[in-house]
Amino acid sequence: MKSRLLVLTAALAASAALPAHADSVFNRIATFPVAENLPAGTDARTPTSSEIIKASADGKTLVYSDSPLGAVGFIDISDAKAPRPAGIVKFEGEPTSVVVAGAKVLAGVNISESFKNPSGHLAVIDLASRKIEATCDLGGQPDSVAVSLDGKFAAVAIENERDEDLNDGELPQLPAGDLKIFNLSEGTPDCATMKTVDLTGLAEIGAEDPEPEFVDFNAAGEIALTLQENNHIVIIDAATARVTAHFSAGAVDLDGIDIRNDGALDFTGSQKEALREPDAIKWLDNDRFVIANEGDYHGGARGFTIFDKTGKLLYESGPSLEMKIAAAGHYPEKRSNKKGVELEGLEVAKFGDTQYIFVASERGSVVGVYKDTGAEPEFVQLLPSGIGPEGLVAIPSRNLLVTANETDLVEDGGVRSHVMLYELGEGPAAYPMIVSADDGNGKPIGWGALSGLAADPKEAGKLYAVSDSFYRSQPAIFTIDATSRPAGIVAKTVITRDGQPAQKLDLEGIASDGNDGFWLASEGDAARLTPNAIYHVNARGEIKQEIALPAELLGKDGRFGYEGITTLGEGDDLTLVMAVQREWAGDARGEVKLLAYKPKAKEWSAVRYPLEKAEKGWVGLSEVTAHDGKLYIVERDNQIGAEARLKAVYAVALEDFRPAALGGELPLVTKTLVRDLIPDLKAATNGYVVDKVEGFAIDAAGDAYVVTDNDGVDDSSGETLFLRLGTIAAIN
């Protein structure tokens, strides 16, 4: 692999994210944590989820399924920019899907006692009163529910899902799934009209055990149904409940993809005959439909495909969307395995004269937006979402798109499940805020987990970032062109030791050495045998010097060590300053060290820095940057979303920075608040406040920048915010 990848122009960096036409794009306007719908008196830490989501006919109420809570939830979006909780309807069972039928809500509810004895019913909820009015027994475990466009029929996919722990999840596992069709009257199903569509004997894979997954109607009253594990698609006439066509979803040969979970982003692998195994399916018109090829059994083709209803292949995306997702830093290296970004959810809707296709990546936590051209879809943009977007609903009458993000990490202290709203309007797109260019081989420069930021000392708008230990096999320095919008990652320099990618690094800080090389700060972790250390590398990323902790600090450092590095002075007077994130052994509670090291004299010293008090969790340092007589320090708590209280830049005057020798009493510096970053984080893309504000730099023109660490999209939305704060004089 090349250690340094260069491109000709910064314009290439922006190409992965710019909309095809800048006159109309979607931008996020609001987020709603569904935990706000918890009833009064309920433990706020109760897990919730938003999975499948639909909208009322007037577009002012959202309805979503909440499986862990055992409820159907409602959100008032009369003011789309200020969603409000509108309550829940609780069930004895697990709502798996919802759909709105006029003034009624139909919910598929799973009440199975076991995989071998599946059961469930279709519940009818009055949209106005929120009362359960009726139920129809389904004789199995429901998954997807849909209503015909004329309101005459409802269809329910009865999955009777397999036990993935039984015989390694191999098919068959009876009882077999099927499809139920009901006649509707004013949104209410007539239970006595239920028809069962037998789906056995159709697929080449597991024919006796069909696994229906997702169902959708076209305007002609035809149903398209995916049998995901069976890699099969079935077309059914709703009026007669007759199968009119069925065919294999087929396979795809994939080239230029990352196929290894090895701590590196390497888009040179291939998969032959990757089964599509589609999840969602949506009609584009009465003849064409699109499928999202998530995979759930032995396949997953990483893309989306358009067929006609006879089974003719019209378009295959292959990994093209996956590459756009990677360019935006959303490739889920740790969880990707053979399914890559795992495209799962779909929505199709016409806004004005333009029909859009929305494709949700569950593991990449983004939504790809395309225009349906009737031939090859035209890529428009990527939308940031919460973790694990599952359901999507478009509301063209209000120029809105809504996503439901099922993952709730409350039990791990993480972010909650969110519903997010986007509005179609004039550009530019607010996200992505930073993307990578082509690596010279037709693939994006792989990146993520940006954990430190530094400015080129001479060229305004030129920055450098490092990635942390998430990419353990590929520690790297990224060159950023901040003059483009979005900012462009235009080069990648892999850090090497003896000609090989360096091991045992957790890069958290970077500073220019003024001579085309860099000083890097690596955070220690005794459990991984990774030391807190300083590394001096040349322009090619080759480690030329390693500086370990002094004897006075050995064994006293903890898991939360070096989090930034900067330089003061030059020549024999050069001093390196390192920010330590949290207290080490011997530090007073609420105080951390700013360490200083003079390479020429090999002398260590330090000062004490006072931390803000944590309301919840902990508070620590994330970055240090020297500029114009001050040390600028990023201080943050480890909270996310509504729990976040502290993400800020403070300053310490250099006249107050008088480090003393280690082993004695260290002076306590005085700090001043420069910028509360929480308003900036909220306003950037109208998302929730992210946890890790990791990088801060001031360029040669005096402009300040902030970048956040997306944790490599592991238990993270994957969003990287690249904030432009303006001149440092303006924010002081």
Image (spheres, rainbow, N blue to C red):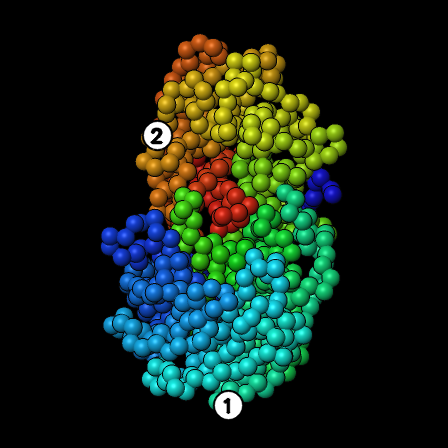
Residue 691, percent across and down? 43, 42
Residue 399, percent across and down? 41, 69
Q: Is residue 613 above or below residue 239?
A: above
Q: How many marks?
A: 2
Residue position for label 1: 240
Res 270 label: none
Residue shown at 46%/73% (left/top)?
140
Q: Is residue 250 above or below residue 664?
A: below
Near mark 2 (Cα within 10 A), the count class, few <14, some 14-19 or many ≥20, is some
Tell me whether the residue at label 1 lies in contact with that at label 2, contact meaning CB atoms closer than 8 angstroms: no
Q: Nearer the viewer, residue 345 or 173?
A: 173
**Eye-nearest disc, 1 or 2:** 1
**Left or right: residue 589 compared with residue 572:** left
Q: Amino acid at mark 2?
A: Glu
Residue shown at 49%/37% (left/top)?
694
The N terminus - image quarter:
top right
Give the quarter of the image for residue 378: bottom right
Give the quarter of the image for residue 666: top left
**Left or right: residue 732 compared with residue 206:** left
Q: Indicate the secondary structure of the residue bearing disc 2.
A: loop
Say whether residue 541 is visible.
no
Residue 118, percent across and down? 47, 69
In this view, the residue farthest toward the bottom is 240
Q: What is the C-alpha distance between the residues marked 1 and 2? A: 69 Å
Residue position for label 2: 612
Q: Indicate the secondary structure of the residue bearing disc 1.
A: loop
Give the quarter of the image for residue 138: bottom left
